[in-house]
Image: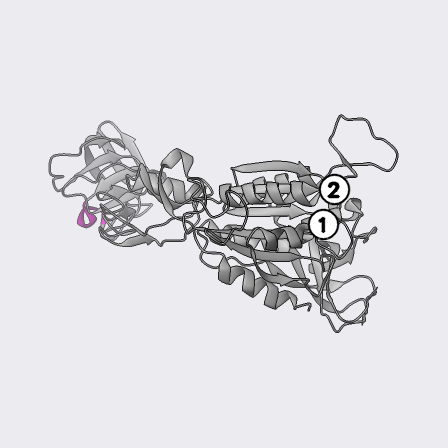
Amino acid sequence: MMISYEEALARILRHARPLSSVRVRLEDALGCYLAESIRAREPVPLFDQSAMDGFGVRASDVAEARADSPARLRVAGMVRAGDDARGMLRRGTAVRIFTGAKIPPGVQAVVVQEYCEETGGEVLVRESVPDGKNIRRKGEEIRRGARVLSAGARITPPVIGLLATLGFSTFLVHRKPRVTLLVTGNELVALGKPLRPGRIRDSNSHALAAALKDTGIQEVSVRRVKDDEALLRQALMAALQDSDFVITSGGVSVGEYDLVKDAAVSAGVRTVFWKVAVKPGMPNYFGVWKRGRGRGKGVGKAAGKSAALGRTLLFGLPGNPVSALVSYHQFVRLALLKMSGQRAPGRFVFPAALEKDVSKKAGRAEFVRGVVRVNNGALCVVPTDQQGSHMLSGLASANCLIHLASDATFVEHGRQVPVELLSWEMHGE
């Protein structure tokens, strides 16, 4: 029985659990998810420091300073970023200071250099400043001991910078899933090999491997498997033992050579669902393999490399290229992100005005490939040409998916429709 898109996604995410933690170096952590909360070992800023280039002064010495009546102060020294500022600033004097430099004792404020004129060992200050002006106080951004990052936070370039600021060279992150990709089909030919009549080039292994890389998955093993029950079962059993996540492409429908579901069950995989009421991608299969369930030789033995929780998730994607990629985007990617440590993986969905009438059959939610853009200050979206599930050109020119409800049959232009950005398009212009 087919289930809805929402129910399928909910079941997948219930079974996708963050993997065990590993300690990584700062330079290797980009794109990972924290497995621990980070608390500041020291305050930020570490000391009172100047926020501007200018002159450090006592506020009372410049209280009456004006553009036409400057305060005249003796320059007592200079403090650059990195200097250890010492010595009390006395009344009637100022110190030349630069952005990021430590505030010397006695300095109450910094006058920016645009309001100062240095001449003959003195400085004319043409602005009054209150106590604390242009000074970054110790700990004003982060107090010592404060939690600055929660477990589950994604490590981005700014997070890398923050961790370096706080002195963290290593920390715990969730391990990323090890993935095996099994692409099935007697008709598939590897690139560079001659095409015989009736054969086609294998695009799914390349497209899905690229999608995995785009998701941040680094350990991917790709295998092509013929439509042979024994060979498929053997490949599937090995993949289940060695991986956290197994993805198959093709062989999940109801034809004579659609062998993935039966091979999975034979290998001890518990079926969670088969067939989702979506287009493209109706014949999707999802199951869970737990160590010890296997019935074949080698299945159920500790494999050393197998998932830390003793389970492997199996996703059987359709063989049509568009169906495979759209299904990956809508289902597999979110599960992989959660296993990588993202606490609540979600989708970037927003409304846009439809620029063209769209018709569909009732009964299945539909993901129409489209291009979203700004037109006269408003978000608009238009479906691409070539909407067939075998037509990669339509998906290649799209930057989004238009969500159409299962009960919809006709949506007229001008209506607001939910639009979801394709993840690989978020890296573009």
The residue lying at 82 percent from left, 62 percent from top is 356
Query: Which residue is under mark 1?
Result: 251
Pick whichever, 21 or 46, lies toward us: 21
Q: Is residue 200 above or below residue 130?
A: above
* Quarter occupied by the N terminus: bottom right
The answer to whether 275 appears left or right of 307 in the picture is right
Q: Amino acid at mark 2?
A: Gly
- Secondary structure mostly seen in magenta is helix
> Magenta span has 60?
yes
* Mark 2, residue position: 185
Q: Quadrant of residue 68?
A: top left
Residue drawn where x is 77% and y is 72% of the image:
408
Q: Nearer the viewer, residue 129 or 230?
A: 230
Residue 154 vertical placement versus 101 (above, below)? below
Q: Which mark is residue 324?
A: none
Work out whether residue 87 or residue 161 is closer to the camera in this orientation and state it: 161
Q: Is residue 399 visible?
A: no
Which residues make up the magenta segment? Answer: 58-62
Q: Is residue 181 visible?
A: yes
